[in-house]
Amino acid sequence: MEQTSMSGTELRRLLFVSYLYPPMVAGGVPRVFQFSKYLPEFGWAPTMLTGPQLSAEAVDEGALRELPPCVEIVRAPCPLAAHGPRGAPNPRTGLSGLPRRAARLAMRLVLVPDRQVLWVAHAVRAGLRALRRARHEVILATYGPGSNLLVGRRLAELSGLPLVLDFRDLWSDVPQPVFATGLHRALAGRFERRAVAAARRVVAVSEPMAAHLAERHRRRPEEFAAITNGFDPADLARVRDARAGPGRPFRLGFTGSLYGGRDLGPFLDALAGLRREGALSPDTFRVEFVGNFPPEEAERRGLADLVECRPHVPHAGVFEVFARADALMVIEAPGYWAQFSYAAKVFEYLLAGKPILALVEPGGNSARLLEAVGLGRIAHPADRAAIRAALLELLKLKGAPPKPVDISRPPLCDIYRRRLTGRLAAVLAAAAAPDGPRR
């Protein structure tokens, strides 16, 4: 039986390669998931080629129930999937973080381009079986991990289908010490060049990143498109304000993962300073971390009674955090991320209409977006004095009503996921066109 879109037209099928996918909870999952959720509205039915599902990881079973019936999920095994499951607290310093750091270094030295390289052969075989079962018109592979691009390129070679790449981050020339050695960076560069050379179209998470990739790979700018992260319009129905009465402490909420140089040490130091001054106490202030924040970071600063730590929750659960908070907090490492990307949680936070303590680089993409909406209190993530001042300013807003949110007006009208998915559908159609560019 043929599957059709809401407009009544027959759906075109694409193979979408992403190791990270629900029910896994991870930093890159919302972008991929919401694309797959809304692509059928624009004429495309995704076959999701993804990694294994592990019960030990932070999971969001409810997410899969939001998918249209035409979305097929194909899981391929990865031998190292059970090592260091995502969503667990990850101590980074001291003796408690030593085993994790040693294991990560060993894997970075041996497994190239990443530990999911052991998934590649399994994924290629599973992808070929899926391509034989049904007619597909294009392959879309998202970075990261880099192994996604290896799988996408190999499947495109074997099937003859056009390839589209989606970059959530820069890969081989990311200006961060993410590679074990210079040789590992060079090998990543080789993999990236081959993948981009094989692709008909490339998508990036921001205009600066799209321009950078086009110049780096000496491709025509029109073959690159910028499609940002965004918020799911369906989440508006989850937004509510459920703060308790006036005698409660001020609540600051944080949801998400700490990775990629995101350091909450200066924020915690600012809290400790305010605690010593008597400006904060358990009766007047609480911060709620939902994600992989290691509680010992707060304990060693004497903040255990101010800090509540919970593991990752399903997507719907983050809105419960928003509901009981007076303000929300987001952090982004300065430099590269401020220039080329956005703090991923910013988009969801905007829906709550509550003040946001934004530990981001002033002038970066996230800072400009928050300033345009009028919700951000911006402080550089390493500037303890600025963080302290922003906290004191936020404390004065306890109990203030949320700001009304209108997604029909700029800048929000440009960053909701349904509209962004329409742009992706246009990119897929261009790549699948018979007269599309070939390399």
Image: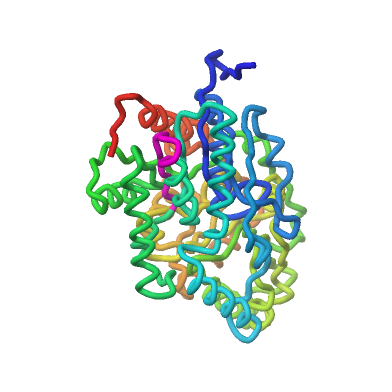
Nearer to me, 293 or 382 = 293
Which residue is at a point 66% across and 51% down the rendered structure image? Answer: 52
Query: Looking at the picture, does residue 302 appear above or below residue 190?
Result: below
Farthest residue in the bottom direction? 95
Question: Is residue 158 highlighted in magenta?
Answer: yes
Compared across the picture, whether 208 is left or right of 113 comes to left
Query: Looking at the picture, does residue 32 appear above or below residue 121?
Result: above
Tell me if I can see residue 128 in this picture.
yes
Query: Looking at the picture, does residue 219 appear above or below residue 177?
Result: above
Farthest residue in the top direction? 8
Q: Quadrant of the C terminus?
A: top left
Compared across the picture, whether 57 is left or right of 106 comes to right
Nearer to me, 397 or 357 = 357
Specify start and end residues of the magenta stretch as a single range.
Answer: 156-168
Query: Looking at the picture, does residue 55 appear above or below residue 9?
Result: below
Nearer to me, 425 or 30 = 425
Tell me if I can see residue 277 in this picture.
no
Compared across the picture, whether 310 is left or right of 35 comes to right
Q: Quadrant of residue 313?
A: bottom right
Residue 201: percent from the left, percent from the top?
Answer: 35, 38
Residue 105: percent from the left, percent from the top?
Answer: 52, 76
Which residue is at a point 64% across and 16% down the rendered structure image? Answer: 1
Residue 210: percent from the left, percent from the top?
Answer: 32, 47
